[in-house]
Image (cartoon, rainbow, N blue to C red):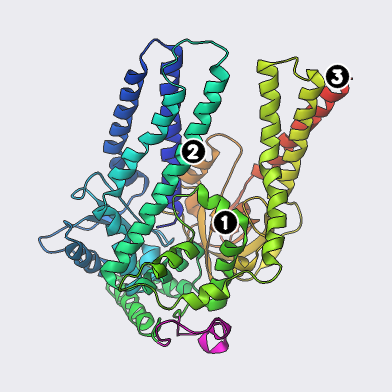
Amino acid sequence: MQGYVRRRLLAVLCVLGGILVLACWLVAVLSPVPFTWAMAGGAAIVAVQYLVAPWIITWLVPATELARTADGYRGDEPVAAIVARQCQAAGLPLVRLGIVDDGEPNAFTFGRTRRDSRVWVSRGLLDRLDEREVEAVVAHELGHVAHRDVAVMTVASLIPMVFYYATAGGRGADRSGDNDVNRLLAFVAYLVSRLALLGFARARERGADHASCRATGDGDALCSALVRIAYGVDEVGRERAARIAALRADDDNREARRLARRAGRMRSTGALGIAGPGGLPAAGLLGPGLLGPGLLGPGLPPERVAAAMRWENTSPWARWQELFATHPLVVHRIAALERSGLPGAPTHWAALRAAAAPRPGERSAAWGRFLIELPVHLGGWACLLAAVTAVRHDPDLGGPRTVAALVAAGGLLLVVRAALRSPLGAPEPVDEAASLLERLDAGPVGAMPVSLRGRIVGRGGYVASPDFVLADDSGIIPIVYLQPFPGARTFFGLTGADAFVDEEVLVTGWFLRAPGPYVELRSITAASGHTARSWQFVARYALSSAVFVLGAVLLAASH
């Protein structure tokens, strides 16, 4: 499932993979060790990572694990019966089931083999989703187990390394003029293979979606769960989750579970029960008769869901970022389920997807922004890379003026990028976090200064996470805490972030979509008086300005 923990775990694995590639490249290029030995060593390191990863993840994402019995799990958590039932239906041994005490709705699976598989489910998911949606999510995760996706993706991750060493490895101490060409080919091969691997991962996600649809016969519930998790839309979820959390704080766990089950049953009877197969015409879908219980169920206002999907249908940034993501866009996942032909394929979402189609002029405006923002996003670094390459490999190519001009142009583009990424205007007060989903001008580069009020309900479950999950009456939204200083994020996560959990807060920052919605934090102030600030935006402006000034000085001196 999409969520903070999965994204951060992926980031950790990417860093480890990068270190592995760099280490093997150094062995192959700077030592007489044969290329095959380097590959064997790389495969051994990947194997060790595969063996120890479950222990690392268990430490990073602490959970209360339910004891397994002969026919289920010990305890009266409703999700335990769901997992046991779905394991039996899928012909799987009982997985290890853990409950993560965090307010972000999230679930993920990990482990080495089918018998060693774990499914970790957050409190936020159990409290905000109804029983049908929880069962659909569980079936999706067990689909990963049944397909042995952890092992498959581990083996597949060796493919980029093979492509890389096919062009760059085994050259020993060769210093011929072909080195630069080989390095370029190596990089291109590695990039293409990484994109192919990400495409493979997205295909595995669609496979797990189909497995859920087959197991439950209820693709509509999976679509509803995906919308709640990916977009954070849930206009009744915060109130319900707060009541359940208060009961748990008073050690009235039995009453809390009873309330959660009752809320789930109430939503199950209303959700998707009014409209017949095929849904309603798009023109009537967003009418006042469906603003409450009905087609999408309480807490999922069709206007908000359509607005969230419209950005994915309209913005070129959505497709661009999907290329570099392990999960398909939600609108594409729903469409794939509808086209699957499975007995439980969704029947109530076609009209909503039609309502989310771009309106006249929206797509051309989005492309106009994209064609401006993409060169700004990449151009500064491209100019600096070209300047470094010219200095290292051919100082006479164009002379000092060319290098100085490249540095100045790169600095100027970085300044513009900083202005787009962290605009310094007064933040726009936002009454409902979910209303930000309607902004089609958001993206990973073009940010909007905003201020929001709400309660911090979680930190994504990650033990050292410096980020937050803010909830208001309209839903939830991730708050990302960045700092320019090495180790500052981890230090704050270990020492200061917990002080904000369960507090009413005022957050200022910048709203972006990449492709999921989030706010990059500038400052956070809790009702208790705790405060924190990020200086990442200051570093962006300072460093980019310094590069521009350096280029301008070099350009003036070269005359």
For label 1, the residue is 318
Instruction: Indicate the position of residue 286 as horizontal and vertical percent values.
Output: 56, 82
Query: Looking at the image, how many numbered discs can be counted on the residues?
Result: 3
User: Closest to the observer: 331 or 237?
Assistant: 331
Dot 1: what SS? Answer: helix
Pair 1/2: label in front: 2
In this rendering, position of residue 260 left or right of residue 442: left
Q: Name the chief secondary structure element in magenta.
A: loop
Gap between marks 3 and 2 measured at Cα: 39 Å
Is residue 390 located in the magenta-colored stretch of the structure? Answer: no
Is residue 284 located in the magenta-colored stretch of the structure? Answer: yes
Q: Amino acid at mark 3?
A: Ser
Pair 3/1: label in front: 1
For label 3, the residue is 558
Q: Residue at 75% of width from left, 34% of height from top?
A: 411
Q: Residue at 49% of width from left, 41% of height from top?
A: 490
Q: Quadrant of residue 20?
A: top left
Instruction: Indicate the position of residue 462 as horizontal and vertical percent values.
Output: 41, 49
For label 2, the residue is 192
Q: Would you call the spot at circle 3 few (<14 residues within 10 Å), some (14-19), or many (20 or more)?
A: some
User: Closest to the observer: 341 or 528?
Assistant: 341
User: Closest to the observer: 421 or 159?
Assistant: 159
Instruction: Indicate the position of residue 126 as horizontal and vertical percent values.
Output: 35, 67
> Is residue 539 shown to the viewer in this render?
no
Q: Amino acid at mark 1?
A: Ala
